Image (spheres, coloured by chain):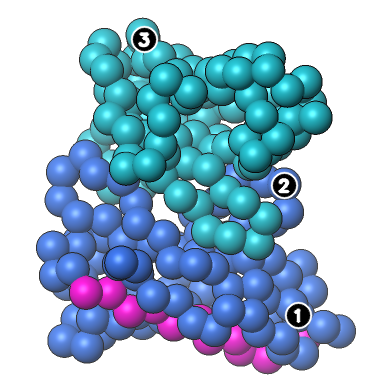
Amino acid sequence: GAVVSQHPSRVICKSGTSVKIECRSLDFQATTMFWYRQFPKQSLMLMATSNEGSKATYEQGVEKDKFLINHASLTLSTLTVTSAHPEDSSFYICSARVTGRRGYTFGSGTRLTVV
Amino acid sequence: QQQVKQSPQSLIVQKGGIPIINCAYENTAFDYFPWYQQFPGKGPALLIAIRPDVSEKKEGRFTISFNKSAKQFSLHIMDSQPGDSATYFCAARGSGNTPLVFGKGTRLSVIA
């Protein structure tokens, strides 16, 4: 149980375009979703925390106008990378905490390549 | 400021060996300490986790040792196999609905 489905797993886009990444909680309600970014051979860096029905909280240094997060329902959170540039190329991962449990479940990640 | 310090950065062991990965933390408010395994191109997967009121927890070949006074915890992998070759992250979390804080990761290679 407690599965987070993340799509797409891999996307290549042209510089200047926008890309949307979706994370769906399949068998539980995710009141909070965490979005991470991971560069090659590095650790996960928290980008933002989104709570259902409210605005996301962004970590220092993360551009909220560039990384748009929407958490309109208890089962879906999206991250949109707007006007993507090559430096946005990275591995993006979502994570949700299952209510009533201490554990966190992660999506399978999205490899974004901006060309 | 890194809240969870992990070492070593990389580790090579022979099949059957027992790799040990160590983590240290400063924030005494942390109350949940998981270990994650990550394969290339995949999201992290929970291996095992421990609470600070327990000094050791074992699940299959994976064991966490926890030293609350030293603010350290470690992962031991018994009878390691080539399939265990992956990157391992320790993490910690405070109370409430707060995100995990990750260590920098350890790249483990188990050679036959």
- B78 in relation to B105, above or below: below
Residue at numbered disc 2: B41
Assess whether mark 2 and mark 3 are in contact (beta carbons under 8 angstroms): no
Q: Tell me which chain the residue with mark 1 is part of.
A: B
| Residue in the foreground of this view, choosing between A39 and B67 | A39
Residue indicated by mark 3:
A73
Front in this rendered view, residue B53 or A31: A31
Residue A27: image quadrant is top left
Per the image, is B96 magenta?
A: no
- Tell how many labels: 3
Q: How far apart are labels 3 and 1 at the CA level?
A: 43 Å
Rendered colour, chain A: cyan
Which SS class for mark 3? strand
Q: Is residue B24 magenta?
A: yes
Label 2, label 1: how far apart the Cα atoms are: 19 Å
Query: Residues at badges 2 and 1 in contact (C-beta under 8 Å)?
Result: no
| Residue at x-position 56% and y-position 18% | A82
Instruction: Find the magenta span and give its range.
Output: B15-26
* Residue A87: percent from left, percent from top: 65, 39
Whether marks 3 and 1 lie on the same chain = no
Residue wearing tag 1: B110
- Of all chains, the one bearing label 2 is B
Extreme-right residue of the structure: B112
Q: Position of residue B4 (x, y in %)?
A: 34, 70
Q: Amino acid at mark 2?
A: Gly
